[in-house]
Amino acid sequence: MNIILICLALALIAGLLMSRLAKLVKLPAVTAYLVAGLILGPFLLGRLGVPGLGFNTLEDVEALKIISQVALGFIAFAIGNEFRLAQLKSMGKQAIVIGILQAVITTALVDVALIGLHMIKPDLISIPAAITLGAIAAATAPAATLMVVRQYKADGPLTKLLLMVVAIDDAVGLVLFSASFGIASALERGSVSVVNVVLEPVLEIVLSLVLGAIAGVCLHWLERFYHSRSKRMSVSIAFVLLTVGISMIEFEVGGVSCCFSLLLVCMMMGTVFCNICPTSEELMDRVDRWTAPISILFFVLSGAELNLKILKNPAVLLIGLVYIVARSAGKIYGAYVSCAMTHCNEKITKHLGITLLPQAGVALGMAMTATNLSDGSVIRNVVLLSVLVYELVGPTLTKRSLIAAGEIKPEGRTSARTHNKPLEVLHKITKH
């Protein structure tokens, strides 16, 4: 236990120190946290085998998965706060059309590219693996996007639409993956299961939305009994932890596998809560501040679990290159087409696609499910490679797009220390 605490403390400190270096070269803090994780991971400092100095094995990182799950829960809860009725009325239709269309176009382009690669080199990748990777390509990482928005206090039409599209993208990606994975499994078995392809993904979405809605109503009902800000914040944190725990439950009903999507459950809870609680915005702000260290640990651990061994495999590098190029083209072109169809302004149409490139936890979870296929290891390695590239480059591209759209103000030298000086002077005056 003491070694785990030392590792977590070192991970947090390393992430914070690396963020100072990243600021010098104007990189987002998210990238700094990921690099800190790589340095502390089992392929660099972790290889020294010194207890407490980094993570010695990937299993050590996996053992701390609960921290990542909790962080994702709070991130999803915060994104749910963006679905306020006023915003849904003004941007809801655009967000839904863009969220669905860009995901479908991305999946189609990656499918075509990888199936074309199969036609050229059949031994390199199978059709089922190509179809599965196409569906995984639709997933976008909400965590990195939200962290960039928070760090630079981005605000404007593009930022608001981006957070809504990222949230919708998770549900669309889940349906696309479940359908594609069902077809891929059928191609290997020689039989199609309607339950796996249609029923289970739809059921997962419905169950997640219902559970999230109930949790949001219950949270509002309970927090009304408390007037202290700290106690109301504690109730909110308890509910996020509760929904994360319940979201991990899996069960069967009549031979049909039932489970929940952690991101959808927590997003729905945040959406319902922010629309029925008049003081939700102030409360959400307090929860965000409390969860800042957990978010840093999430990205450091994400960097530590990136497997650098995949860089030695030429086949994975080739498939990964095709996957990354096709996915990037799909996200950028898909967003451009869908924005044009929904009559978005020029800045949104031009820059939204690039902000949708980050990919991480959701894609890795899908890749883990796909390991049941004969080419499952290839799928996982390709996704690991793409996560390595997108997580290191994606946040910077997101930042640049938001700057180009005029939604990030030039960085100043504001400091909490200097900000608090007037309060200190006032305190001294009143004391004397």
Image: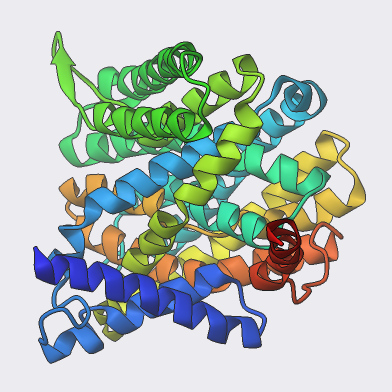
Q: Is residue 336 left or right of residue 172?
A: right
- Residue 236 position (above or below residue 405): above
What is the x, y in percent for residue 413? 75, 77
State how the image is colored.
Answer: rainbow
**Residue 388 locus on image (x, y percent):** 41, 71
In the rendered picture of this protein, how many numbered marks are placed on residues? 0
- Residue 260 appears left or right of 348: left
Quadrant location of the C terminus in the rendered image: bottom right
Q: Residue furthest top?
A: 254
Give the quarter of the image for residue 265.
top left
Q: Residue placed farthest to the front in the image?
A: 432
Q: Residue at (22%, 79%) from the top-left corner?
A: 54
**Which of the 4 image quadrants contains residue 360?**
bottom left
Q: Picture quarter containing residue 90?
A: top right
Q: Is residue 30 above or below residue 107?
A: below
Q: Can you see residue 309?
A: yes
Q: Is residue 141 visible?
A: no
* Residue at x 52% of width, y 68% of height: 30
Quarter of the rendering occupied by the N terminus? bottom left
Q: Nearer the viewer, residue 244 or 388?
A: 244
Identified at 20% across, 65% down, the residue is 61
The foreground one among 400 and 277 is: 277
The location of residue 315, given as percent across then percent down, is: 31, 76
Image position of 43 with respect to 404: above or below: below
Identify which residue is drawn at 30% across, 58% down.
379
Q: Position of residue 271 (x, y in %)?
A: 57, 25
Foreground residue, 353 or 399? 399
Q: Residue furthest bottom?
A: 48
